[in-house]
Amino acid sequence: MSLVGLVVVSHSARLAEGVVEVAAQMAPDVAVLAAGGTADGGIGTDLDAVSAALTSADAGAGVVLLYDLGSARMVAEMAVELLADPDRAALVDAPLVEGAVAAAVAAQGGGDLTGVAAAARTALTTTDGPSAAAELQQAPRTEEVPVLGRFRLTNDIGLHARPAALLARTLAGLDASVTVRFGGRAADATSVLALMSLGARGGDEIEVSAVGPRAQEALGRVAELVERDFDD
Amino acid sequence: MGCTAADVAAAVRAAAEVVAEHRDELVELDRAIGDGDHGENLRRGFNAVVSALDTSTPDTPGAVLKLVAKTLISTVGGAAGPLYGTAFLRAATALGDAAELGPAEVTTAIEAALGGVVARGKAAVGDKTMVDALDPAVRAATATSGSVAEVLAAAAAGAQAGAASTVPLVARKGRASYLGERSADHLDPGARSTALLLASFARSAGAGQ
């Protein structure tokens, strides 16, 4: 199955490339492409460049576009309108860096166009704890007894960007709701940004709870990752 | 007598000269409340339009405007590219295959251009944008009966007054909106360039009578 692609539209080629660099690190198999600057290397946006990136990033599952300022949105809109099928692309109003990271991870986890767009759109809200979506998912399962585990992080950087992305990816698609707790706060384990915002470092102990039909397996996967030091 | 494709192309070439003459003024206006590139971006765009008209001769007024639109969209770089591009594109679409333009067609084209700018930029009257010039231009054109030159003269006058009305406004759209209150007491560069273009089109139509 093909993954949703991502295009970062910016006034600056270097800004677009930088955002792509950060987002792509979290999502090795996702086409994350930069469309920044004008054709002559100046500050601005170039419709042809955005259209070309949009086409290249579409592996069959569609593309999410993120943008920085005013005309970048307008140019991105025009590029989408020019597609043979404009429904294959979603333009998302989101904080550029957080949105790109959240979208890249959601795409890597096999999310569809709607899901990846939603991940980008809610990128800021999910950094403050479990996402609204995760809470909703968990709501009907409150009577279930969660499977609990405590894990000491033995890798150097703890739940930083790459390990957090790996954890989220490992659990994506598994029928279980997993919550990671540290320092009195909780994070939805499928949200990279929420995991990172816990600030758990190497040597810290995190608590992981899972509910749902495959809760036990989810916990097992987390245990394996921690055991492998997140492949660091 | 209506405007042919050649008349429209000539008017666009004349407008390109006006844009070049006012490049520095537009840069200064934009430097005060924006990113300072409006004059240069428009000059580059209209230069490219003139080059495009040198190498191809569209055979209807609508086709001329479509060429203008496509060229501006791909060469301007800033917000004026998609905004003016959409304006000219909507005007072109509204004109269809008409071989000549009378006053009714010109009014329709300006109305369509306003619709395009509003759709693309999501701005309303009072936001301190191109819309503040284009909206009164449409109202003036609609209220005028007469020749193409008279309709365009009315539209240009409306745009001129509308642009002037942006001076005290606090910007709510575009780069200037980041300045908040500090955007007041400045003429909006986009409204100014809109007024300049319509004034140039009106002069071309007047000279062609």
Image: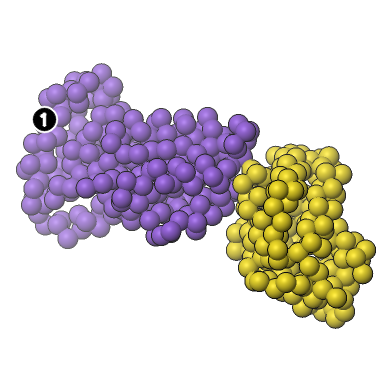
Chain colours: A purple, B yellow
In the rendered image, residue B175, in percent from the top left (x then y), is placed at: 66, 46
Q: Is residue B101 left or right of residue A105?
A: right
Q: Is residue B136 left or right of residue A165?
A: right
Residue that appears at 27% across and 41% down: A108
Question: Can residue A187 be seen?
Answer: no
Residue that appears at 11% across and 36% down: A221
In the rendered image, residue A62, in percent from the top left (x then y), is placed at: 35, 51
In the image, is residue B43 above or below residue B188? above
In the image, is residue B78 above or below residue B82? above
In the image, is residue B56 above or below residue A195? below
User: Where, by quadrant of the figure, is residue B135 drawn?
Assistant: bottom right
Q: State the SS at label 1.
A: helix
In the rendered image, residue A22, in percent from the top left (x then y), is placed at: 39, 31
Residue placed most toward the observer, A114 or B198: B198
Q: Which residue is mark 1?
A: A224
Q: Which residue occupies the extreme top position in the image?
A: A156
In the rendered image, residue A136, in percent from the top left (x then y), is placed at: 25, 57
